[in-house]
Image (cartoon, rainbow, N blue to C red):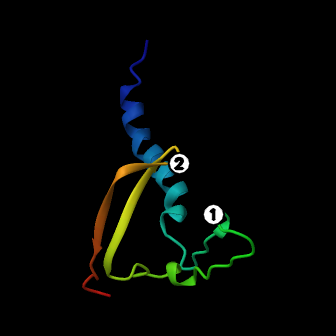
Amino acid sequence: MPDHSLFRLRILPWCIALAMSGSYSSVWAEDDIQFDSRFLELKGDTKIDLKRFSSQGYVEPGKYNLQVQLNKQPLAEEYDIYWYAGEDD
């Protein structure tokens, strides 16, 4: 039986390049980000403007209170999260 290991080594770089070229276009994020507010639990016809969340720095620096829910049941402990502005904000 012939040894195919040399053939496999020659074709391996081509296979890797081909696999990476297919995902190259999906690596770069688009500038335009749109949020779907249907995931929010809004009451009635409440509308929320989410445009501010589509750009860098959408979280205002400050102290935020975080409550974790598991299966829609809040855990007993709440956490304070401190968000700081980055150098380029």
6 left or right of 42 in image: left
- Residue 89 in percent (x, y) is at 32, 88
Residue 82 horizontal side relative to residue 6, left or right: left
Asked if 49 appears above or below 82 in the picture, the reply is: below
**Residue that numbered label 1 is attached to:** 41
Few, some or many residues within 10 Å of mark 1 (<14, 14–19, 20+): few
Q: Nearer the viewer, residue 57 or 31?
A: 57
Identified at 41% across, 40% down, the residue is: 12
Residue at x 61%, y 65% (from the top left corner): 40
Tell me the quarter of the picture where residue 32 sits.
Answer: bottom right
Q: Residue furthest top?
A: 1
| Percent position of residue 85, x then y | 28, 83
Q: Secondary structure at mark 2?
A: loop
Picture residue at 47% right of the left edge, 53% below the top: 20
Q: Nearer the viewer, residue 34 or 61?
A: 61
In the image as oriented, which residue stretches furthest toward the front?
Answer: 76
- Looking at the rendered structure, the kind of residue marked 2 is Lys
Residue situated in front as seen by the camera: 83 or 78: 78
Foreground pick, 62 / 18: 62
Q: Looking at the figure, which quarter contains the N terminus?
A: top left
Q: Is residue 10 above or below residue 46?
A: above
Q: CA distance from mark 1 to mark 2?
A: 12 Å
Q: Which mark is residue 5?
A: none
Which residue is the extreme one toward the bottom? 89
Q: Residue at x 41, y 32 (%)?
A: 8
Q: Quadrant of residue 42?
A: bottom right
* Residue 35, image quadrant: bottom right
State the residue position of label 2: 72
Helix, strand, or loop for circle 1? loop
Q: Where residue 72 appears, x then y in whole percent?
A: 53, 48
